[in-house]
Image: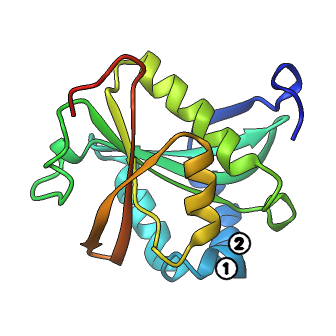
Amino acid sequence: MPKAEHAPKYRFRDISREDFGLVAKWLAEPHVAKWWGAPETELASIEEAMNSIETRPMIVELDGHPIGYLQSYDPHLEDGHPYQDQPKGTLGVDISIGVAELIGKGHGTAIIRQLAAELFANGARRIVIDPDPENRQAIRAYEKAGFHYVDTRTSIYGPAHFMALDAPGVTDT
């Protein structure tokens, strides 16, 4: 991994309908398809999120090139969301690196670290993420980014290895 001063910087931008072809391609990649649903179902969900107040779907760019999809969401804005037991100011995130050649090179950890720093700078107090318990690679990336295990939950997508990262200076959870 490069030294911090040479670490890659990522750009997070709102997704647009023009991105759907690329996201559909990523969703069909074996390393993404294993953890996500059918591309047409996921794209419909992303399109719905584009018009919601609780979720912000985004594209991750590296050096001006799209490399992945991520979203942040406020569980307190969604009726009956299972993570409403988290403190106010909590945001959830989901991420997938779409470009297979970039997997296992530290990008997941670096993206999550940068995203967390930006969300905390904008007032978030806690960030949660919920990978499948069998997705050891993702769990390890999130641990490297500072997330800690909270508990195992069952979401609408199945079992979740629920993890959290608190903003610097936040100790009351």
* Residue 28: mark in rendering: 1
- Residue 10, given in percent of the width and then of the height, sits at 72, 33
Q: Are marks 2 and 1 in contact (CB under 8 Å)?
A: yes
Report the residue at 87% width, 41% height from top: 1
Please tell me whether mark 2 sits on a helix, a strand or a loop: helix
Question: As shown in the figure, which amino acid type bears the numbered disc 1?
Answer: Ala
Please tell me whether mark 1 sits on a helix, a strand or a loop: helix
Question: As shown in the figure, which amino acid type bears the numbered disc 2?
Answer: Lys
Asked if residue 20 shows in the view, the reply is: no
- Residue 84, given in percent of the width and then of the height, sits at 15, 49
Asked if residue 11 shows in the view, the reply is: yes
In the foreground, 95 or 39: 95
Compared to residue 102, the image places residue 16 above or below, namely above
147 left or right of 89 in image: right
**Quarter-of-image position of residue 103:** bottom right
* Residue 25: mark in rendering: 2
- Residue 155, given in percent of the width and then of the height, sits at 27, 72
Report the residue at 46% width, 73% height from top: 132
Report the residue at 65% width, 41% height from top: 111
Compared to residue 69, the image places residue 165 above or below, namely above
161 left or right of 84 in image: right
63 left or right of 168 in image: right
Q: Which quadrant does the C terminus fall into?
A: top left
